[in-house]
Amino acid sequence: MHSLLLVIFILSSYAIVHSYVVYPLWLLVFTGGRKNSNQEFTPGDDLPEVALLMAAYNEEKVIGEKINSVFNSTYPLNKLTVYIGSDASTDKTDAIIEELAKKFPQLKLIRFGGRTGKSGIINQLAFEAKQPLFILTDANVIFKPETIFNLIRHFKNENIAQVAANIIKVSVSNKGIASQEKTYIALENKIKNAESIRWNAIMGAEGGCYAIRKENFSPVPKNFYMDDFYITLNVIEQGKQIVFDKEAVCNEDVPSEAQEEFKRKVRISIGNFQNLNRYRALLWKFNGTAFAFWSHKVLRWLTPFLLIICFGTSFVLMFHDRWFVFLFAAQLFGFFTPVIDLLLNINFSLLRFVSHFYLMNLALLRGFIIYVKGVDSNVWQPTKRETN
């Protein structure tokens, strides 16, 4: 029994370390720079028409800045149409869009009478739009002038179905968990860029901004969270290529409050397990994307359970080996760091990273419980926007 528990502890520990440390390091160290390609549009080409699709609910704090950033673009505006679906907004969102539509005739507002949810709105907008290329984006993701062109240029290559933007997290200050979340997302972007170089695929284009061919867009099922991951895995299932473009830069505000990020991570967790069930067949393809799916995503989604296994086995093993006393104590301390942070407002960066890690895994566990119970609606409440 002692030997069996030791094996279980070692395997569970390695699975966590593999996903968070070994896989990223291996990928970043052994993946070279971006491949040169002459299959890209240039600014002088006859560029394709593009539909920008966006769902919005009570986004009065950011919607004006977002729309202006879209139309302050180097991409030909006569080739760009913006569709915004207002999910029964009750603030000034609709009024701001209507006022800006007087300035930008390519801006279309579609009102939804009752709360529909992001995926339902995007599905409807995608049905309405006739342009061959879509850009899906969120209201709080602010574009640079070159963002749209850098996304669209790759579609000269007929094998490329989707292009992910380089979304950089920004914050008014580094209070709370803002610094930890920015660091985490910056690393995630590097991993996705390396995945696109090595396998022509990434494990999830972030929903804040990505482009996709209309023909490769797949409507998201009712009550699904994580529409971006669903659509990305569907592209992989179709055998098409996905690019991460480091130069397609846009900015997104990051919550500084742990409670706000916790709620967002719970929604993400629900979608993770929905997508795992839908696309589980991709795990058994025995190719690079299957390896990436296991390493980058599935093992992370299983980390809450792996942490519990490590904690339970080390509790038993500490009665047989004194080193497990220290391991058990360290894990116990880790579980309590979010509480310590909440009560004492920790300013020590490393300790806050530990707190953030355990809190986000608690959100994963919470999302899994909701998923198992059944999801009745994917209608969302936007994360509180951080503004100057």
Image: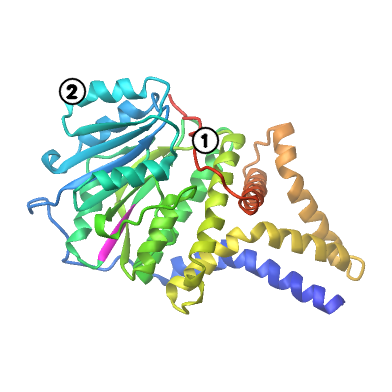
Identify which amino acid the numbered label 1 is placed on. Answer: Pro
Where, quadrant-wise, is the C terminus in this rendering? top left
Q: Residue at x 64, y 64 (%)?
A: 16
Q: Residue at x 44, y 61 (%)?
A: 203
Foreground pick, 209 / 367: 367
Marks 2, 1: nearer the viewer: 2
Residue 233 horizontal/vertical position (percent): 41, 62
Q: Is residue 103 visible?
A: yes
Residue 204 horizontal/vertical position (percent): 43, 57
Q: Is residue 32 visible?
A: no
Where is mark 2, residue-wise? 102
Residue 28 horizontal/vertical position (percent): 44, 65
Check the image and report above or below for 286 versus 233.
below
Q: Is residue 178 left or right of residue 319?
A: left
Q: Is residue 319 left or right of residue 163?
A: right
Mark number, residue 255: 1
- At mark 1, the secondary structure is loop
The span picked out in magenta is 160-164
Mark number, residue 14: none
Q: Quadrant of residue 31?
A: bottom left
The figure's colour scheme reads: rainbow
